[in-house]
Image: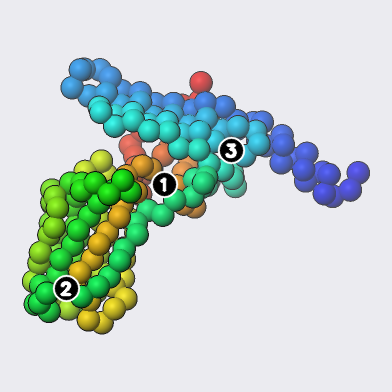
Amino acid sequence: MNKVVILLLLFLVKNEEYAGLYEYSANENSAMYLKESINLFPNNTFTYNYAWEFSKFTVNGNYNINQDTLTLDSYPQRDKIIINESFKGSKRKSIFTVKNKREEKITYHLTLFFENDSVARFENQFGDLIVNSRALKSFYVQTTQGITSPTYIILGKNVNNFKITMETNRVFENEKWVIKNNAIRPKGMNGEFLNYFLDKK
């Protein structure tokens, strides 16, 4: 038996070991409802389901397991954020407009980073946000559901108008969770580990 066949067999055995449904739910009282699950299939694909209050979605993708690390990638992959830079109006003002991929304005939080290393955060914004331009360097956007974009580094030297399109569904891009003892510790939409585990059913 050659090495390729042996590696393939070990790969399939490993996938069978970890394949299955992992789930967490919390609904002790009517004010809080959360159900999160991921189903790992032997062919290295997964289905992720999330339901919290009025937010509910499903994500499909591919996974890989290396020791105690579960790596997830959505499929088909979607951009978390799309940004168009331009110049508009006065150099003293910067304009931010945030919409979802259906071209609908959404409520968002915006964190700005400046060349002098100062930081400004604007919470619960809707529609256009106009701020004083103070040598902006970069920024990131977060939805009220917690979905956080990567930090975007401003490309243009004389731009002040930013049209931002956010993906409001969960996107996995080389995201690493911990898998151990028939349980998985997931990350939240902000990229931080959560304080609970998804248990194998």
Q: Nearer the viewer, residue 175 or 162?
A: 162
On screen, residue 69 versus residue 31, left or right, reads right
Q: Nearer the viewer, residue 79 or 161?
A: 161
Quadrant of the rendered image containing residue 51: top left
- Read off the residue under disc 3: 45
Q: Where does residue 30 sit, x and y in percent of width and height?
A: 20, 17
- Read off the residue under disc 1: 171
- Give the spatial CA distance, label 3 vs label 2: 45 Å
On screen, residue 165 versus residue 126, left or right, reads right
Mark 3, other Cα within 10 Å: few <14 / some 14–19 / many ≥20: some
Q: Nearer the viewer, residue 18 or 60?
A: 60
Q: Amino acid at mark 3?
A: Thr
- Give the spatial CA distance, label 2 vs label 1: 31 Å
- Read off the residue under disc 2: 88
Mark 1, other Cα within 10 Å: few <14 / some 14–19 / many ≥20: many
Q: Amino acid at mark 2?
A: Lys
Q: Amino acid at mark 1?
A: Val
Residue 158, above or below 41: below
Disc 2 is placed on an element classified as loop
Tell me which residue sits at (62%, 39%) in the image. 44
Spot the residue most to the right: 1
Tell me which residue sits at (10%, 64%) in the image. 130
Q: Nearer the viewer, mark 2 or mark 1?
A: 2
Residue 61, above or below 79: above
On screen, residue 198 versus residue 113, left or right, reads right
Tell me which residue sits at (31%, 46%) in the image. 102
The colour scheme of the drawn protein is: rainbow
Disc 3 is placed on an element classified as strand
**Quick one: label 2 or label 1, which is nearer the N terminus?**
2
Spot the residue most to the top: 29
